[in-house]
């Protein structure tokens, strides 16, 4: 009976052992998979760059999935760990850029590249206004705002009377270059050989280091039909004046001074857009010190005047437009013009006179001589008046038309007696005849103007 029991026990033991082997074999297959090691190619990478002044966009021409780690060194003590980066440098220069790559196998390699960055600045200019515009010449202002980086070396003015958008190399466009200016400098460019009586368009330009042109604002001026600058010795337009000192735009430095009772107002001619001189009829006038240029042998005086409505008769009977003499005594008088209104209709009388030169002795007085005339005119309007003296002939013009003429003036031109100022709006201290009203665009020439020049002035 013992043998069968032993045999059964052995059978049971074998069965349990086989089950255990199956269990162990099954569990081990799930928890302990076979490891597969990656295969890595040798690291070969290049740095790609896109420059924009101080900013550089960096990237790598490799598959980012092959690498576990990226370490950038931009050469300026700044670092990053992305595959692509936008890095901005503090200053221009050449930098050695390095990137250290670690792949999936733990292999490492460092790639480097030399990168140069520049701080480019776009150059800029400004277009100024025009001045001394004549029939064939004009001055225009140019300002250099910034030469840029790299420094531009070509800049100036381009202009055309056909092309309203002038550019360098454009159709029917001329250029006038400027050199040796620094940032912020302004200059005046003289244009010549212009076509009379047309509108010119002009603008400033500058060419950068890449050959690209940059332009300022387009502006415009109109040349005159006749020369109105030659022989000019005093010119006052009042448009830019402040205070009591009035600039002489002729270039002769005959600066004027406003006396109490004279001021500049903005409600003037040309649709009330111009500044004009206002005189109170009591004490105000414009005074210009004596100078040789104001004592010419031949003379033209041009001005605009307006007398307000409603003045009393004693004022309208005579008001001085201008007078050249000693102020205190009236001695050494050279030339004069006065205007009066009177009668049942607004008749205007204008006397323009000179003291002819009959000897070199200024202590010997000569008689006034010149053209006089009376016509019916609207006293409320602006009028343009011109007096011209050329030897024995004197002429006056009103609103561009011949007003009066005198052909029998004696002597040899206007006498030359120093010591007296030129005044607009008053005669002299002993007989003032103050002008009450407005004056504008006063010009004095040392030459007799032609009718074409006078008609041109009546447009200004």
Image: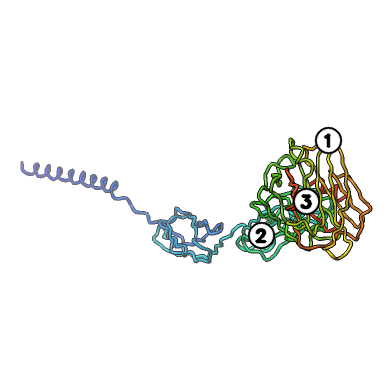
Q: CA distance from mark 1 to mark 2?
A: 56 Å
- Closer to us: 124 or 455: 455
Which residue corresponds to the image point at 62% horizontal and 61% vertical from the top-left? 183
Q: Residue 92, image x and y in percent?
A: 53, 64
Q: Secondary structure at mark 3?
A: strand
**Residue 178 appears in the figure:** yes
Report the residue marked by disc 2. 186
Q: Earlier in the sequence, mark 2 or mark 3?
A: 2
Report the residue marked by disc 3. 322
Q: CA distance from mark 3 to mark 1?
A: 24 Å
For marks 2 and 3, give the one nearer the viewer. Answer: 3
Q: Residue 256, image x and y in percent?
A: 71, 55
Tally the marks: 3
Q: Earlier in the sequence, mark 3 or mark 1?
A: 3
Neighbourhood count class around disc 3 (C-alpha, 10 Å): few under 14, some 14–19, many 20 upward: many
Q: Earlier in the sequence, mark 1 or mark 2?
A: 2
- Please give the label number shown on residue 343: 1
Left or right side of 434 for 400: right
Q: Quadrant of the N terminus?
A: top left
Neighbourhood count class around disc 1 (C-alpha, 10 Å): few under 14, some 14–19, many 20 upward: few
**Residue 42 appears in the figure:** no
CB within 8 Å, label 1 to label 2: no
Which residue corresponds to the image point at 78% horizontal and 58% vertical from the top-left? 331
- Closer to us: 126 or 90: 126
Q: Residue 157, image x and y in percent?
A: 73, 57
Residue 359, compared with residue 394, is above or below; it is below
């Amino acid at each position: 009976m013992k043998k069968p029991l032993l045999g059964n026990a052995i059978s049971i033991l074998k069965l349990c052992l086989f089950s255990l082997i199956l269990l162990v074999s099954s569990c081990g297959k799930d928890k302990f998979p076979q490891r597969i090691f990656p295969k890595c190619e040798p690291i070969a990478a290049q740095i790609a760059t896109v420059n924009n002044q101080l900013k550089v966009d960096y990237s790598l021409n490799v598959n980012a999935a092959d690498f576990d780690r990226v370490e950038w060194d931009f050469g300026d003590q700044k670092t990053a760990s992305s595959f692509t980066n936008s890095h901005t440098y503090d200053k221009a220069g050449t930098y050695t850029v390095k990137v250290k790559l670690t792949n999936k196998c733990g292999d490492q390699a460092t790639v480097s590249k030399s990168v140069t960055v520049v701080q480019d600045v776009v150059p800029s200019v400004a277009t100024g206004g025009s001045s001394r515009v004549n029939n064939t010449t004009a001055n225009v202002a140019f300002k250099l705002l910034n030469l840029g980086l790299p420094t531009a070396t070509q800049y100036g003015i381009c202009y055309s009377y056909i092309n309203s958008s002038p550019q360098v190399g454009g159709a029917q466009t001329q250029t006038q270059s400027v050199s040796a200016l620094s940032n912020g400098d302004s200059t005046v460019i003289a244009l010549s050989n212009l076509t009379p009586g047309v509108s010119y368009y002009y603008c400033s330009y500058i060419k950068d280091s890449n050959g690209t042109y940059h332009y300022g604002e387009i502006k415009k001026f109109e040349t005159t039909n006749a020369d109105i600058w030659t022989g000019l010795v005093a010119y006052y337009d009042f448009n830019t004046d402040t205070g009591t000192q009035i600039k002489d735009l002729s270039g002769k430095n005959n600066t004027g001074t406003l006396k109490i009772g004279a001021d500049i107002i903005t409600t003037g001619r040309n649709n009330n857009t111009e500044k004009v001189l206002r005189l109170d009829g009591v004490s105000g006038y414009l005074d210009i010190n004596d100078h040789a240029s104001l004592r010419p042998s031949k003379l033209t005086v041009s001005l605009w005047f307006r007398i307000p409505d409603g003045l009393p008769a004693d004022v309208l009977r005579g008001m001085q437009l201008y007078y050249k003499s000693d102020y205190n005594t009236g001695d050494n008088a050279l030339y004069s013009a006065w205007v009066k209104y009177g009668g049942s209709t607004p008749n205007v009388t204008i006397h323009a006179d000179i003291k002819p030169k009959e000897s070199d002795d200024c202590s010997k007085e000569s008689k006034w001589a010149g053209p006089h005339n009376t016509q019916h005119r609207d006293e409320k309007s602006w009028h343009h008046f011109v007096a011209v003296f050329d030897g024995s002939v004197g002429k006056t013009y009103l609103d561009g038309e011949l007003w009066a003429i005198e052909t029998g003036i004696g002597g040899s031109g206007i006498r030359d007696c120093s010591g007296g100022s030129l005044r607009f709006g008053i005669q002299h201290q002993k007989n003032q005849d103050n002008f009450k009203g407005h004056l504008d665009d006063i010009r004095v020439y040392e030459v007799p103007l032609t009718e074409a020049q006078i008609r041109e002035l009546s447009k200004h």
